[in-house]
Amino acid sequence: MPANARKLLHGGSTGHSPLSMAGCACAATTGGRKAAGVDPELKDANRKRLRRIEGQIRGLQKMVEEDRYCADIITQVASVQEALRGVARNLMKNHLHHCAAKALQSGKKEETEAMYDELLELIYAHLR
């Protein structure tokens, strides 16, 4: 990764995560970054999905406590993982439409390269 892109991604001494400073549409605030342009329907869908996932997790805890058959628990774990991947896909779509699009269309080489690096890292590290 070029040093200038790494600097944008790592944000120096700002205390943000390594992926926090690719020049995107997210607004930095004292409480952390906030996404700009979040689709209200997408946000609502993600909240509903996360509440269902929370229920699935409670169900998994109960299955473990009750010594349920391991294969049944594993099947439910896979279901939760797929549900979480669905939330991640929605978040990635929003990120591409707003944050990444702004950075990639900026015409600024450093900002564009930093966003490419951020997207690659997201894909390889989080969306497997």
Image: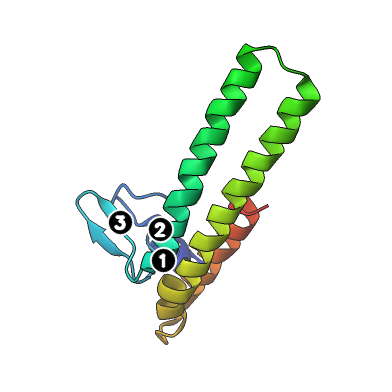
Q: Mark 3 — residue? A: 33
Residue 36 lies left or right of residue 56; in this view the side is left
Q: Are marks 1 and 3 in contact (CB under 8 Å)?
A: no
Residue 105 lies left or right of residue 119; in this view the side is left
Residue type pointed to by label 3: Arg
Q: Which mark, by number, is residue 44?
A: 2
Q: Give the x, y percent position of residue 32.
A: 28, 51
Q: Secondary structure at mark 1?
A: helix
Indicate which disc, 1 or 3, sits on the residue closer to the N terminus: 3
Q: Residue at x 38, y 70 (%)?
A: 24
Q: CA distance from mark 2 to mark 3?
A: 20 Å
Residue type pointed to by label 2: Asp
Relative to 33, is 52 above or below? Answer: above
Q: Residue at x 61, y 13 (%)?
A: 65
Q: CA distance from mark 1 to mark 2?
A: 5 Å
Q: Secondary structure at mark 3?
A: strand
From where the camera sits, is residue 1 visible? no
Q: Nearer the viewer, residue 43 or 125?
A: 43
Q: Mark 1 — residue? A: 41
Q: Residue at x 43, y 68 (%)?
A: 4
Residue 120 found in image quarter: bottom right
